[in-house]
Amino acid sequence: DLLSEEATDAVQQLLPDYAEGDLASLCSWPDEIKFWHKYHWSSPLHYIDTPDFRCNYDYSRDCHNAREERYMCVAGAINNYTAQLTTYGKSSDAQYNLTEALLFLSHFMGDIHQPLHVGFTGDLGGNTIIVHWYRRKANLHHVWDNMIIETAIKDFYDSNLTLMIQGIQTNISEGWSNDVSKWEKCSTNEFACPNPYAVESIGLACKWAYRNATPGTILS
């Protein structure tokens, strides 16, 4: 409902038949394949490691993988796959796999908005910080990836995922409606603008995710 008619048509054309037109059903695909040998190169594209305790992000400084290869981070991936998808319908030549580009982009837009996907290098975005979410032991990154959402569904939506989705959709169409025009276009006039998302995420990571989250802490 939130896509233009042109974008909806492109998505339907690019999705494999077994998805039955449901993009959401395949949005976890990049997580499933990042451990496969064929796609192991994609693992660094899920996150950005920033300098410890600096609480800021710089694309030229931070967007690289462990081998210092530039643009191998979630912001670089969003730029890359957005650029690939802009070629849709312009040529019959299969220069890119646009189905994979769609699935990667859809997933990475979620990743970059999870604060600890733009976390500190030293703790691997909270992966090495072991805490307790209520009584359950987990690393901090997993708490933010899964457990907070699971608790929110249980406490505020009667364990009904559909109700939570409807609540988010209402926020987009009503509560955040004044912000939609800002989301539609980048201030730099580029097709993609992941840098503001990354800046927002590291700010939220420092303000909330890392706050009081020392090893062994009980969070709630």
Image (tube, rainbow, N blue to C red):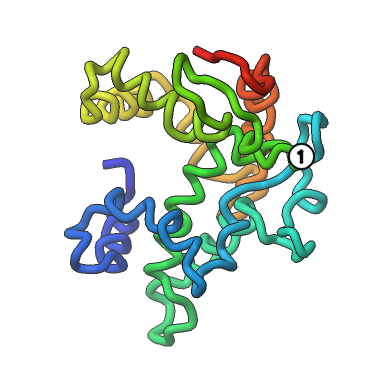
CA neighbours of label 1 inside 10 A, class few (<14), some (14 to 19), many (20+): some
Q: Quadrant of residue 165?
A: top left
Of 139 and 60, the residue lying toward us: 139
From the viewer's perspective, tell me whether residue 193 is left or right of residue 163.
right
Name the residue at 71% across, 45% down.
Answer: 49
Q: Which residue is mark 1?
A: 122
Question: Percent position (x, y) of residue 83?
Answer: 55, 65
Question: Percent position (x, y) of residue 164?
Answer: 28, 25
Q: Is residue 214 above or below residue 191?
A: above
Q: Secondary structure at mark 1?
A: loop
Q: Is residue 58 above or below residue 177?
A: below
From the viewer's perspective, tell me whether residue 62 is left or right of residue 16.
right
Q: Amino acid at mark 1?
A: Gly
Q: Quadrant of residue 6?
A: bottom left
Question: Percent position (x, y) of residue 55?
Answer: 77, 30
Of 179 and 165, the residue lying toward us: 165
Of 172 and 184, the residue lying toward us: 172
Name the residue at 58% across, 23% down.
Answer: 131
> Which residue is the extreme one toward the bottom?
93
Name the residue at 20% across, 57% down.
Answer: 21
Q: Quadrant of residue 50?
A: top right
From the viewer's perspective, tell me whether residue 101 is left or right of residue 130.
left
Which quadrant: the N terminus? Answer: top left
Name the residue at 44% across, 58% down.
Answer: 30
